[in-house]
Amino acid sequence: MAAPDSRAAAELAVYLGVISGINSGCMSCGGAELGELPTIVWQGTFSAAAPVHGTVGVGGVAFAAAYEDGKGWAVSFQAC
């Protein structure tokens, strides 16, 4: 099992955000089916002590992820 502040846990939070956004149609009408998990590219040094940034998917959608003890990873996407 991955530690809550690990890179694996952060990647899970990113994937869940992507899947939720795609399934809901990015809060508009409709949605899409995700056939495979997109590629995550992390920028800079990964650390749970400070927000981390990266891109996800073919289009390279930018995101930021921040870890908070007791709450886990919060991910925000610069999309839609």
Image: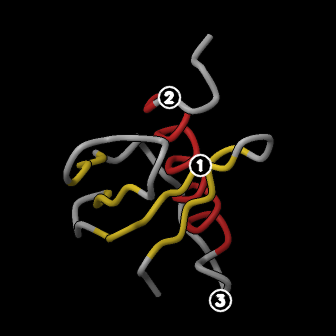
Q: Is residue 40 above or below residue 2?
A: below
Three-letter residue code for mark 1: Tyr
In the rendered image, the residue lying farthest to the front is 49
Q: Please name the colour scheme applied to the rendered image.
A: secondary structure
- Labels 2 & 3 near each other (Cβ < 8 A): no
Instruction: Residue 23: give x, y in percent of width and height.
Output: 63, 63
Residue at image position (19%, 51%) is 44
Give whichever of discs 2 and 1 has the lower sequence position: 2
Q: Is residue 6 above or below residue 27?
A: above
Residue on which disc 2 sits? 6
Give whichever of discs 2 and 3 has the lower sequence position: 2
In-image side of 68 versus 49 (left or right): right
Three-letter residue code for mark 2: Ser
Give whichever of discs 3 and 1 has the lower sequence position: 3
Three-letter residue code for mark 3: Ser
Instruction: Residue 53: give x, y in percent of width and height.
Output: 33, 60
Residue on which disc 1 sits? 67
Picture quarter containing residue 1? top right
Residue on which disc 3 sits? 28
- Circle nearer the viewer, 3 or 1: 1
- How far apart marks 2 and 3 lie (CA) works out to 32 Å
